Image (spheres, rainbow, N blue to C red):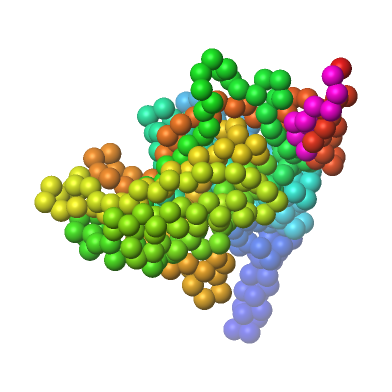
Amino acid sequence: MIGSRVVLALAALSGAAAVCPNACSGHGTCGEDDVCFCYQNWGMGDEQSGDCSEMYCPYEFAFVDTPDEDGKVHKYMECSGKGICDRSSGECECFDGYGGKGCQRTTCPNDCSGHGTCEYIDELTFGSTPGEYYAAKPSNFSMGISSTSAMTFASISESWDSMKSMACVCDAGYIDVDCSRRMCPKGNDIFDQRLDTSDAKLYQVQNITLVAAGPFGNGSMASYGEFSNKSFALTFVSTLNESYTTIPIVIGDTLYTSDTKPVDAFEKQIKSALEGLPNGVIDTVSVGVNFGSAYSDYDAYDEQWQLNMKITFTGTAVAGPQNFLIPQVDECLAGCTPKITGLNLVSVQDATGTYSRVEEMERADFNNYECGRRGKCDYDSGVCECFEGYTGLACGTQTALV
């Protein structure tokens, strides 16, 4: 009698387990009213139960969706609303122009044509060098040298499409939204070289100020020893966004004396390093150096040791506006190029204190046009097709009167 009851009980249990559709496909538990309670990421179509035979796809912030009762948009949506869910695999089949888990981000046009990198908007910069941002802000006539990369903005991370929208960052010498076009050389218009011919010729003058940090990091109680026999380098970014870094520039141990010979030699060293960059990107510069001490903005009883280098771009290749030079002052020894000791500097901008910086002391009075405005750029080759009567890399030479 007892054995019969056990058999009936087991039969009843097996019958109850079989009531839920397909035994919940092994991806859920059978509950009351014969309804499956599916495990996470399992369901059936748009239902959260069914027979638990289908997978859900990742949910991400939607690019476009309808507003809710509070007028809010960009809510969570399967495949970000930019793809169709393959429920057999739980993976999104993204529409063209979208990719990533849950189609959460845009893709870059033509994969940047093989001439750039695809970056999130959070990583995009203003211009190609730190100086471009500071030069664009009238109140910031100089840039601190604590950064050697172009300006990014933390506020972008608060945008709904932070880490979603992407764009191409082109390699040097390439432009356009998909980096498909080559850049052509830029130069002065041979018939309209200067913006204002009524005044004296004005070349761009950049002043680099290096302020020794001293034991407290703010410049007070600094000594000449923080510069003596130390080395640094300068990076020049051309108007084609090509970066060139000089050989090490070594600061002598007698610049602070009244003897002008060490200063003259140091000026020649900087001039030679800049004019020695490859491809003739800087053909001619003049250099002036001033070294000494000034009363500290932090401590009236101590002095700050400062090295000022005034670079004037006088050559034909650099006659127009140029990017700010980027001082390389971090230690870079074994295995580095260039190999430099680096400098211990006051590098963080402070509105009330003196800091190491690069300033534009004089704006160039020369223009800077693609192909000198006397030719047409072949964007496939990056070569200027000069108009009749003109020649040169940037069509800056007149060959005949037309």
Instruction: Judge whether residue 398 is colored magenta.
Output: yes
Q: How many marks?
A: 0
> Can you say whether 326 is above or below 318 in the image?
below
Q: Is residue 326 visible?
A: yes
Q: Nearer the viewer, residue 7 or 145?
A: 145
- Which region shows up in magenta? 393-401
Q: Measuring 40% from the left and 49% from the top, which residue is drawn there? A: 289
Q: Measuring 65% from the left and 24% from the top, which residue is drawn there? A: 193
Residue 344, image x and y in percent? 34, 61
* The N terminus lies in quadrant: bottom right
Q: Is residue 1 visible?
A: no
Residue 250, image x and y in percent? 45, 63
> Can you say whether 402 is above or below 159 in the image?
above
Horizontally, residue 387 falls left or right of residue 288, namely: right
* The C terminus lies in quadrant: top right
Horizontally, residue 127 falls left or right of residue 240, namely: left
Residue 302, image x and y in percent? 15, 53
Instruction: Judge whether residue 289 is colored magenta.
Output: no
Q: Measuring 39% from the left and 33% from the top, which residue is drawn there? A: 140
Residue 63, image x and y in percent? 62, 36
